[in-house]
């Protein structure tokens, strides 16, 4: 079968190759329909990240997936034709959180991730996964089901904040999301659904597609920090840019007792001169919390599906409009190249 692969560690090695059919024994065979492209794919394609499965020299990409079930084994809860999303991460076999099924909190670092680390992804004509690592997506979600995985990252971020904030009496009203990319926009959607008054800050023009998407979901758009309401502080901040100087800047916008969740990463090193005394003072004197969050649990995937279902009713077409460009498997590289009006670029695998 055809698959989009890279050689890990080799920049610009993407190609469509003939790869072995997936092992569907005791697993669910599915046809990947749409594959989302994100910054992780860019890093892997640039040779900075990514690991092939043991014994393989190539890695099949594709971790943001919407597929259609082709074949199931006896006793399966799924049927051919059902739409499914495979969970990205698989547990290691020797850490405490993984032994409890909380693989997103793996502490050994020996987990595997489909299409990223030690396990093939789904940028291929066929793929297979254990049913316990598939999440069913209802029909009304449509092609937006390809957003379930990035949505799960946001759902986990909120879960982390809300569970950690049980440390104090906390009745949050306001939230700031930094970054109006797919993660930031899905965070705006989820937080408005949860009753927060949401501001999304980015650098793009207020007339851009991203800024309009913010307003359409009932959140407020701020172009740069000068666009934030003066003196405005927020009970919850979700940092979705990975631009590390912004982490320190945004900490100054946290309300007393507030929490900030960091969801973005940027590779390499950067040194900035910050007023670290002020940063330390605020964190201590205002009982503030900063927490990092990566990946997602099954519950977060289900929360993401529910978010997209509700959006389909309350804001018809909104999630579909986040998919701004579709490319074919052979044109994956053009999908990686950022264009100004891109929000989420997906590969349409059916046309391979
Ligand atoms: Zn991704
Ligand atoms: Zn583990």
Image (cartoon, grey):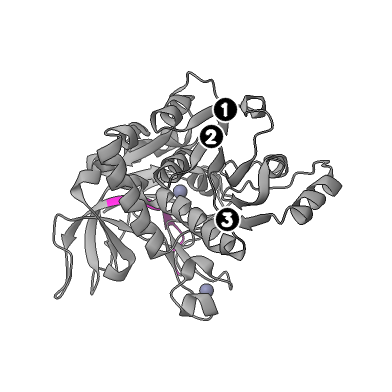
Segment colored magenta: 55-66
Question: For the residue with label 2, is its CB less than 8 Å from the closest atom of ligand 1?
Answer: no
Spatial CA span between label 2 and label 1: 6 Å
Helix, strand, or loop for circle 1?
strand
Furthest toward the top, the residue is 207
Helix, strand, or loop for circle 3?
loop
Could you classify mark 1 by the number of other residues whose Cα lies within 10 Å: few (under 14), some (14-19), or many (20 or more)? Answer: many
Spatial CA span between label 1 and label 3: 25 Å
Residue drawn 39% across the image and 52% down it: 149
Residue placed under numbered mark 2 in the picture: 200
Residue drawn 15% across the image and 75% down it: 75
Residue 326, percent from left and from top? 33, 33
Q: Is residue 269 left or right of residue 178?
A: right
Residue 140, percent from left and from top? 20, 45
**Residue 62 in sight:** no
Residue 177, percent from left and from top? 55, 40
Q: Which mark is residue 222?
A: 1
Q: Is residue 173 left or right of residue 258?
A: left
Question: Which callout, 1 or 3, points to the residue nearer the camera?
Answer: 3
């Amino acid at each position: 079968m055809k698959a989009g692969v890279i050689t890990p560690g080799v920049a610009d090695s993407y190609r469509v190759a003939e790869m072995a059919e997936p092992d569907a024994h005791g697993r669910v065979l599915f046809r990947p329909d749409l594959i989302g492209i994100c910054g992780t794919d860019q890093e892997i394609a640039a040779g900075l990240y990514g690991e092939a499965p043991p014994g393989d020299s190539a890695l099949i990409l594709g971790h943001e997936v919407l597929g259609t079930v082709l074949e199931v084994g006896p006793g399966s809860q799924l049927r051919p034709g059902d739409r499914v999303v495979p969970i990205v991460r698989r547990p290691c076999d020797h850490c405490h959180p993984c032994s409890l099924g909380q693989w997103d909190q793996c502490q050994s670092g020996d987990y595997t991730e489909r299409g990223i680390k030690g396990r093939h992804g789904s940028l291929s004509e066929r793929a297979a996964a254990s049913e316990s690592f598939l999440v069913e997506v209802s029909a009304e979600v449509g092609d937006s089901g390809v957003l379930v995985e990035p949505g799960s990252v946001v759902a986990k971020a909120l879960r982390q904040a809300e569970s950690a904030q049980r440390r104090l009496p906390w009745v949050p009203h306001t939230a700031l999301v930094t970054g109006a990319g797919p993660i930031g926009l899905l965070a705006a959607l989820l937080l408005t659904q949860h009753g927060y008054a949401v501001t999304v800050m980015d650098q793009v023009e207020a007339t851009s597609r991203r800024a309009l998407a913010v307003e359409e979901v009932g959140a407020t758009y701020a172009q740069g920090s000068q666009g934030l309401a003066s003196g405005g502080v927020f009970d919850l901040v979700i940092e979705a840019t990975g631009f590390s100087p912004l982490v320190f800047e945004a900490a100054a916008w946290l309300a007393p007792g507030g929490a900030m969740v960091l969801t973005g990463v940027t590779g390499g090193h950067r040194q900035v001169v910050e007023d670290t005394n002020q940063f330390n003072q605020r964190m201590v004197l205002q009982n503030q919390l900063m927490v990092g969050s990566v990946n997602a649990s099954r519950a977060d995937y289900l929360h993401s599906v529910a978010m997209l279902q509700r959006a389909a009713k309350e804001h018809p077409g909104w999630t579909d409009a986040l998919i701004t460009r579709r490319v074919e498997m052979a044109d994956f590289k053009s999908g990686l190249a950022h264009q100004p009006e891109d929000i989420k670029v997906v590969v349409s695998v059916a046309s391979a």
